[in-house]
Each structure stands twice: as C-alpha cells, then as structure tokens.
Image: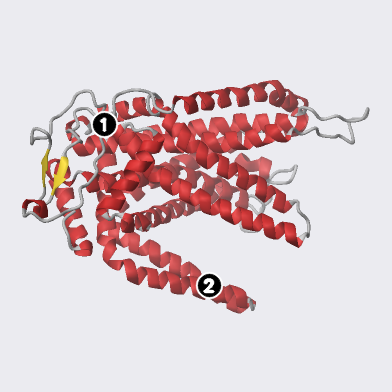
C-alpha cells in the first residue's frame, strides 16, 4: 500500500484551490520500495494554481473572431440572404417537428446505452472490437463477389490486423472496463455535466448558422451581374475565406474542449472531495463551469487554435486537390501535404486530450499543462495505457448503435407523418407511395436526418464519458491513495485490474 507525505507529513486541505477542499497536491508519492531503501523514480504531481486568468491573449482573440464573423454575417450575409429569399425560402415546420421527435428518441436511447455500458462494460468493449473485425471481413467477402481483388486484400489485411490487436490487448480489457465504470459512476453523481454538454452543442449549432450566413455573404455580398441579373462574377477575398475557415474550426474546437475541461474539473472534485460532487448541479459542476469560462478560457482557446489552424490548412489543401484537375505532380504533392497535416492534426489532438485534463484539474496554462501531463506519463510508464483505444472504441460502438436505432424509428415516424418532410420529396405534389403504402422518395431523407440527430445526441453524451475516463486515468496515476480513501469499491476494482496486467502497484 502506498502512503503520502507533505511538508507536515499529512496532506492539508485548502479552501482557495478552486476544487472545493481538494487535498494538497504537492504531496510526494512514496512506495514500499522507498521505505525499504530501494531507488525509485519520483512521481511529479500536479499543483493547484492560484486563481488568475491564463493565456488571456487567446481568449481576447477568440472573442474578437466571434465579433468579426457576426459583423460579416450582419453586413454581408443577411442582406444577401434577403435578396435571395425567393429561392431559399422553405417550409421547415414539419422538418422541425421531425427533428424534435428523433431528438427525444435519441436522448431516451442514449440514456439506455449509458445503463447498458455500466452493466455490460467488458462485453461492450469486446463487442466493439469484434464488430470492427466483422466489418473488415464483410468488406472482403463483398469484394469477392464484385471481383475487386484490391478490396479483398484490404479487407483481409484489416481483419488480420484487428485479430492480432484483439489477441494482444485481451488482458487489458478488465482495466479499460474498470476505467469506464469509474467514469460512469462519477458522471452519474454529477449529471449536470450532461446538461452543460448539450448547452455547448446548442451553442455550436447557433454558431454554425451564423458562420454559414457569413460565408454566404462572403461569397455573394460582392457579386456583380449584368443588367438582366445574369453572368454574375464573384469577388472572393481569399484572406477572408481563410479566416472564415479558421473561425469555424476554432469555435467548434473551443466548444468541444470547454466541455472536456468542465468534465475534468468535476471528476477531479469527485476524486478528491466527493462531498462537493454528489448531486446533479453540484458545487463541482458549477465551479468547474465557472473556471472553464473565466480563468481557464484562454488556455482552452490556445489549444483549440493550434488544431483549428491545422484543420483550416487541411481544408484548403483538400479544396486545391479537388480543383487541381488531372495534373499528377500537383495531386501527388497535395496528397503528401495532406497526409502530413493529418499526422500533425492527430498528434495535436492527442496532446490536447490530456493537456486539457490538467487545465481542468489544476488550472494550468496550456503549455504548462502539456509539459506536466507528458512528464507524468513518462515517469509512471503510462505511455502504454494512452495508446489503448478500448474505451473510445466501445463508446463509438454505442454511438453508432443508438444512431442506427434512431434512424430506424425515424423511418417509422416518417411513414406515420409523411407531410413533415414534404419539402424533401422532390415533387411539388408531395411524397409518393408504393403499393404497400411506403414513402418511396422520403426514406433516405428520413434516415439521414434521424441518423445525424442520433449521432449528435449520443456522441455528446459519450464524449462526456470519454473525457471522464481520460481524467480518471490521470488521477489514478497521481493520487491512488485518495481514490482508495474516498471510493474504495472503484479503487479496488481498478487496482485488481491493473495488477492483472502490469504486475506492480499503481
């Protein structure tokens, strides 16, 4: 069993650390080997930072960007839409009814998925891996019948790699399952973070609408046509277009990462001070949300901007590839550049994933958070665990399942109320029916709308769980003693699963 010592040999609670009485995190971890006199690598632990705004310049830049896009939308976008209102006007009331119906269904099944995850965690993880292999094998079999040799090779190769991966990580499934169970328990005790997540989703939708109006204005605001309104020429400002691309990616990243930071703060309070994190809208939820939108907002904007710039460059390269024609040299260069950008984007997102955990837990700046979390995992040998994608695989599997169920029920709703999606029928007379009474030209729109709504709703909920599990991994590395003291049942499960794989005390 591990013990902890601080300057007074006993961790002291603080009231000004922003986590509602979290123990002193400057304590030093001492193992049994230390007591015996053996050399051991010291573990660097995070320290709760003084309350002050971090990376302020990036928060100000983000606010300026939001104002700028709103101004472009107001000056150029809405007037351009007003001129084109005869062509763009649609009756969306039925579509709204349909979307709200599928939204309610998706929320209900997402809640059921949460219960299923908590009850059959290991089976879900195994099922997600087997599903991935089954898809690869199905691809290979279908390509056999189509005579596509290349597809057969790719399918069989993917299946073989998936099978090897499954055999290699089987013994890690119990630990991944214990992580997920702990994350579910922590989020259920503070269910208000799901409400926070959906609020940010709503903000994202509003932002996308404003951005699309601004983009429409950038394309159409300066167009010049002849006397008859034909032969229009568009004066597109490349600089404005690039900034608009950055703005949509940046804002989207900020909304997603804000939820991640909120969840990290809530899980940290649940870990160290559970009395402050045991209700829907607990002090942990309110405090973490307040810190994320104030003192830590600049750090969120900083990390999000790094990824946003990469994504904007990638979008431009993809656009150039689509317009490059048949020039083999240009296509090859652009393809290589896009591949490099994809790799950089993956690394940046991977870095952010754990850096923002430290931002939410202790209030570090973005750069300090990144250095601390990398040092932690390097010293404690957690690099192997970071590479594990078992939990994410299970969450994605559940998201896909809920989306498909929502899509199936959405088709049934459309069959009962075909007038709701009349605008998508492609016919002035509305939907048409076959001899069995099925909508022949609305099934695909119904499927796509309900599937998309299901993905958004369930992915938001599962994203909260993914953030919770990331935070659990970091906290388990830093403070297993507090975990044992405050949550002995979950601690014993995780310790047992850990020892089964790694054969040494965490």
Q: Is residue 287 shown to the viewer in this render?
A: yes
Q: Earlier in the sequence, mark 1 or mark 2?
A: 1
Q: Position of residue 409 (x, y in %)?
A: 49, 50
Left or right, 396 with reference to 83: left
Q: Give the number of callouts.
A: 2
Q: Which mark is residue 325?
A: none
| Residue occupied by mark 1 | 48
Mark 1 or mark 2, which is nearer to you? 1
Q: Position of residue 325 (x, y in %)?
A: 78, 56
Name which residue lies at 30% across and 30% down.
Answer: 285
| Image-quadrant location for residue 430 | top right
Name which residue lies at 26% across and 26% down.
Answer: 18
Instruction: For marks 1 and 2, give the CA distance.
Output: 49 Å
Name which residue lies at 32% across and 66% down.
Answer: 169
Using the image, determine if residue 391 lies above or below residue 164.
above
- Image coloring type: secondary structure
Q: Position of residue 17 (x, y in %)?
A: 24, 27
């Amino acid at each position: 069993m591990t013990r902890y010592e601080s300057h007074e040999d006993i961790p002291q609670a603080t009231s000004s650390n922003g986590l509602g009485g979290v123990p002193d995190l400057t304590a030093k971890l001492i193992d049994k080997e230390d007591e015996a006199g053996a050399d051991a690598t010291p573990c660097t632990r995070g320290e709760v930072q003084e309350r002050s705004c971090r990376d302020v310049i990036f928060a100000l830049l983000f606010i300026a960007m939001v104002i700028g896009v709103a101004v472009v939308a107001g000056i150029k976008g809405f007037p351009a839409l007003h001129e084109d209102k005869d062509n763009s006007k649609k009756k969306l009331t039925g579509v709204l009814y349909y979307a709200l119906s599928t939204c309610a269904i998706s929320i209900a099944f997402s809640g059921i998925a949460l219960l299923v995850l908590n009850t059959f965690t290991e089976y879900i993880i195994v099922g997600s891996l087997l599903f991935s292999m089954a898809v690869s094998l199905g691809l290979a079999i279908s390509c056999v019948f189509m005579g596509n040799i290349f597809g057969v090779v790719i399918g069989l190769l993917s299946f073989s790699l998936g099978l090897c991966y499954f055999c290699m990580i089987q013994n890690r499934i119990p630990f991944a399952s214990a992580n997920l169970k702990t994350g579910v328990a922590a989020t259920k005790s503070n269910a208000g973070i799901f409400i926070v997540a959906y609020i940010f989703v709503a903000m994202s939708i509003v932002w996308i609408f404003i951005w699309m109006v601004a983009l429409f204005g950038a394309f159409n605001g300066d167009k010049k046509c002849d006397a008859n309104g034909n032969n229009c020429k568009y004066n597109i400002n490349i600089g404005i277009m690039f900034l608009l691309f950055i703005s949509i990616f940046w804002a989207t990243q900020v909304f997603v990462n804000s939820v991640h930071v909120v969840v990290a703060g809530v899980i940290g309070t649940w870990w160290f001070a559970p009395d402050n994190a045991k209700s829907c809208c607990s002090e942990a939820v309110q405090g973490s949300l307040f810190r994320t939108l104030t003192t830590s907002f600049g750090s969120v904007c900083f990390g999000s901007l790094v990824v946003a710039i990469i994504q904007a460059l990638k979008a431009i390269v993809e656009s150039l590839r689509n317009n490059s024609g048949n020039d083999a040299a240009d296509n090859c260069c652009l393809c290589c550049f896009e591949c490099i950008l994809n790799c950089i984007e993956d690394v940046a997102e991977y870095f952010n994933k754990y850096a923002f955990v430290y931002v939410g837990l202790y209030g570090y700046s973005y750069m300090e958070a990144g250095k601390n979390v990398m040092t932690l995992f390097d010293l404690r040998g957690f690099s192997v665990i970071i590479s594990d994608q078992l939990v994410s695989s299970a969450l994605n599997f559940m998201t896909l399942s809920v989306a498909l169920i929502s899509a199936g029920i959405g088709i049934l709703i459309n069959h009962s109320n075909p007038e709701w999606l009349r605008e998508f029928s492609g016919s002035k007379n509305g939907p048409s029916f076959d001899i069995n009474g099925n909508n022949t030209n609305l099934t695909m729109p119904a499927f796509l709308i309900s599937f998309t709504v299901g993905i958004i709703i369930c992915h938001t909920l599962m994203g909260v769980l993914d953030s919770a599990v990331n935070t659990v991994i970091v906290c388990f590395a830093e403070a297993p003693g507090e975990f044992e003291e405050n949550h002995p049942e979950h601690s014993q499960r995780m310790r047992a699963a850990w020892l089964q794989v790694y054969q040494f005390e965490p």
